Image: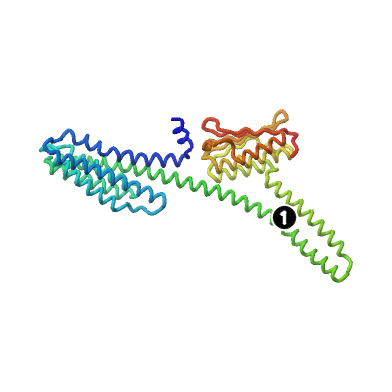
């Protein structure tokens, strides 16, 4: 049992809904022969053993055909191969169902037998259930009405009065419509959940791509002009040397100055990208998580402004890594980031409600982050707490990095 519980907890919410939907279909279909048996037993005619055998065989074939039809429907949905049902399986299910209905009429006692129309209802439910994986709602409702009419015809053939046959047809038609609509609704919910999951992944990728574009733009703005200056001055110095004129040394010195200035500006850009500006990193985390569909709450941003630059850099690493983990390794819908500075120690606490699948130890990201914080005298604690994942980082306010 613990293994099953661990396996279930390792599934994402969309995977759980998908598993629940498929198991509901297969379980309902598997119980079809037993339901048919219970429906026919009250009106059983023991003088027709061969009809009973035909009834059992027809129910079994119908069940297998509906299971194959359902399985093929889910496979088509998984691979976006359209909504056309598997015609061979559908044909076998319909023919076997009609044979089962005929066997039910022969296997029941003479005179009106309520079980015969309900055999039609059960078989119709099985076929419509298998079709509901791929077929839209309106054709399914038409199929439910047709099954109800067939049940009414069977009731008339079995000797029921016309009024009773109409009541049976209406009752079975409405019951089948409600039954199939419920299962069709579950398939629709599954589609919505899977689409939301795909959209969330795309949003996370777009947020990362936007951050990369921002970094590329900043780097271009910083280096474009300086590299152009270096190129022009290098050509000028080479020309002065070629012609033996004065001024080449001054140009080379100026080139060295521009190169050192460029190196300093690049370091400033990289330092800003790596999170030395903790308020900016917190604002970026809020923007990225919201773009990914995660509800974000940030507390203590005022304290971030008062922290020394080295502390902001260290905690900026923590913010970035924790946000990356939320986006890539969890199914969180909400995330809280709380910053506080008391007693000479700054603490950053990140809590999300999407516990990642269980794994042995930390990943490389958290391991590297813990090593960085340890080198500064800080400490990292991370792990699941019930249905939440809590990451807490502490750094001395006087740290130097």
Looking at the picture, how far across and down is residue 213, in whole percent? 62, 53
In the rendered view, does 286 fall on the left or right side of 126? right
Location of the C terminus (image quadrant): top right
Locate residue 349: give its quadrant: top right
* Residue sticking out furthest to the right: 246
Residue 223 percent across, percent down from the top left: 72, 57
For the residue pair 49 and 287, the one nearer the viewer reads as: 49
* Color theme of the render: rainbow
- Residue 19 locus on image (x, y percent): 41, 40
CA neighbours of label 1 inside 10 A, class few (<14), some (14 to 19), many (20+): some
Query: In the shown orientation, is residue 59 left or right of residue 70?
Result: left
Residue 228, quarter of picture? bottom right
Q: Position of residue 189 (x, y in %)?
A: 40, 43
Label 1, secondary structure: give it.
helix
**Disc 1 target residue:** 222
Residue at 48 percent across and 37 percent down: it is 10
Does residue 95 appear to the left or right of 318 in the view shown?
left
Query: In the image as oriented, which residue stretches furthest toward the top?
Result: 343
From the viewer's perspective, tell me whether residue 22 is left or right of residue 205. left
């Amino acid at each position: 049992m613990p293994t099953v519980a661990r396996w279930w907890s390792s599934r994402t919410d969309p995977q759980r809904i998908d598993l629940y939907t498929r198991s509901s279909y297969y379980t309902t279909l598997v119980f079809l022969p037993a339901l048919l048996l219970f429906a026919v037993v009250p009106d059983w005619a023991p003088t027709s053993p061969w009809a009973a055998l035909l009834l059992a065989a027809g129910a079994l074939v119908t069940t297998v055909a509906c299971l194959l039809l359902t399985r093929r429907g889910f496979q088509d949905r998984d691979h976006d191969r359209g909504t056309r049902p598997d015609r061979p399986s559908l044909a076998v299910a319909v023919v076997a169902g009609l044979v089962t209905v005929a066997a039910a009429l022969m296997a029941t006692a003479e005179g009106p037998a309520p079980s015969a129309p309900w055999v039609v209802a059960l078989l119709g439910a099985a076929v419509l259930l298998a079709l509901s994986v791929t077929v839209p709602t309106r054709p399914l409702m038409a199929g439910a009405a047709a099954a109800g009419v067939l049940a009414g015809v069977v009731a008339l053939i079995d000797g029921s009065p016309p009024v009773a046959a109409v009541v049976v047809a209406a009752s079975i038609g409405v019951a089948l419509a409600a039954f199939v609509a419920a299962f069709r609704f579950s398939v629709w919910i599954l589609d919505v959940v899977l689409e939301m999951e795909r959209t969330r992944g795309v949003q996370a990728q777009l947020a990362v791509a936007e951050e990369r574009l921002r970094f590329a733009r900043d780097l271009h703005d910083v280096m474009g002009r300086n590299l152009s200056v270096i190129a022009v001055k290098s050509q000028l110095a080479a020309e002065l040397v070629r012609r033996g004129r004065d001024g080449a040394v001054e140009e080379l010195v100026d080139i060295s100055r521009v190169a050192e200035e460029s190196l300093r500006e690049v370091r400033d850009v990289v330092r800003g990208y790596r999170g030395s500006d903790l308020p900016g990193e917190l604002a970026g985390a809020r923007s990225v998580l919201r773009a990914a569909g995660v509800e974000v709450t940030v507390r203590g941003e005022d304290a971030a402004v008062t922290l020394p630059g080295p502390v902001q850099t260290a905690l900026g690493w923590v913010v970035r890594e924790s946000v990356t983990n939320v986006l890539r390794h969890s199914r969180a819908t909400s995330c809280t980031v709380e910053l506080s500075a008391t007693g000479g120690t700054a603490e950053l606490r990140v809590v999300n409600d999407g516990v990642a699948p269980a794994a042995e130890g930390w990943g490389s990201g958290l391991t590297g982050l813990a090593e960085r914080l340890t080198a500064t005298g800080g400490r990292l604690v991370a792990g699941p707490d019930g249905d939440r994942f809590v990451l807490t980082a502490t750094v001395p306010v006087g740290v130097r990095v």
